[in-house]
Image (cartoon, rainbow, N blue to C red):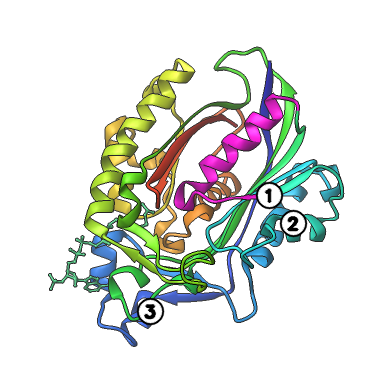
Amino acid sequence: MIRSVVQGCGAYLPERVVSNAELARTMDTSDEWIQQRTGIRQRHIAAEGEFTSHLAIKASQRALDQAGLKGSDLDLIVLCTATPDLTFPATATRVQAALGMTKGAAFDVQAVCAGFIYGLSVADSMIKSGLASTALVIGAETFSRILDWSDRGTSVLFGDGAGAVVLKAEQGEGTAHDRGILAHALHSDGRQHDILYVDGGPSSTRTTGLLRMEGKEVFKHAVVNMAAVVGEVLDKAGLTSKDIDWLVPHQANKRIIDGTGRKLGLPPERVVITVDRHANTSAASIPLALEVAVNDGRVKRGDLLLMEGIGGGLAWGASLVRW
Ligand code: ACO
């Protein structure tokens, strides 16, 4: 059985760090409020002229270096983003050109904060079906560009960044002991479209628009849907929460993450948290967290990782990966 095995991961964060205290100098908020409600202490913000593609290229190059591969070895790039450089073409094609990849396909996937899980499942499916053999899955965002900085209820929550993983087709035994991606579960519920959206777009307003959110509603759905989807993906793989070595969740809010960790019965030290440093970087948040836990030595070969995320759509999902 073909498995998509992770060969390397990489991340990139813009240089500029903005603390809660700095935000409190320009809007009616406080470090205490933000930390208590979300766990966020700071976020990275892209520089003028620094685009989603620039962050994606740097993260991808690091992932390729760790994998010991070159851009020309790739035959698939899936770039997960809700903040593309341009309306079209896909930002993935800019990354493709910069990495020197000339064969195969490069395209974007748009599932907002669930983007990385969706992108991983698309790349895994293409690898398993024989359409690709060496894939780069990137989550990259510049959410600072779509924030309404006059709205303290949303603008304090997000940051910019990028993370990437390289997947390669390898032969597995078809058991849960195989290295690589073991299972995915994906969902969306379009009835919740209007609780988290950007109020612009080429077809509706010819503007880019700004992020709008009913925070309490999103919070409620996030807690319920995350609890359900982690159970579902474990069932699919024939595993239980006792088998999980690391929960690598979408980093939206520490309270949502803690709820999922409790539901799984995982001790807090088995949950990777970066929301304090990165804030919510949408599709980039899972690969950013993954890169931290891999490079500080927590995640080891053979470990079982559960990744999960939810965002606008609503769209959500979970993936189980044996490292
Ligand atoms: N600083 C200070 N006060 C604030 C701020 C702020 N930045 N923002 C809102 N407030 C005030 C509100 O005006 C309100 O004041 P009032 O009582 O005088 O009217 C009060 O704080 C409470 O506001 P709520 O919106 O009710 O606060 P809540 O407890 O719901 O927390 C939050 C808001 C943190 C957004 C929470 O709802 C949440 O985490 N929701 C999940 C949404 C999320 O994570 N979205 C990310 C995208 S989707 C995803 O990735 C899952």
Q: Are marks 1 and 3 in contact (CB under 8 Å)?
A: no
Residue bounds of the magenta highlight: 108-130
Seen at 65% across and 37% down, the residue is 123
Q: Residues within 10 Å of mark 1 (few under 14, many from 20)?
A: some
Q: CA distance from mark 2 to mark 3?
A: 30 Å
Q: Please indicate whether residue 296 sits to the left or right of residue 113 in the image.
A: right
Which of marks 1 and 2 precedes in the sequence?
2
Relative to 253, say whether 27 is above or below: below
Q: Residue furthest bottom?
A: 26
Q: Please indicate whether residue 17 sits to the left or right of residue 61 in the image.
A: left
**Residue underneath mark 2:** 93
**Residue underneath mark 3:** 149
Q: 271 and 224: which one is in front?
A: 224
Q: 274 and 59: which one is in front?
A: 59
Q: Quadrant of the N terminus?
A: top right
Which of marks 3 and 1 precedes in the sequence?
1
Which of marks 3 and 2 precedes in the sequence?
2
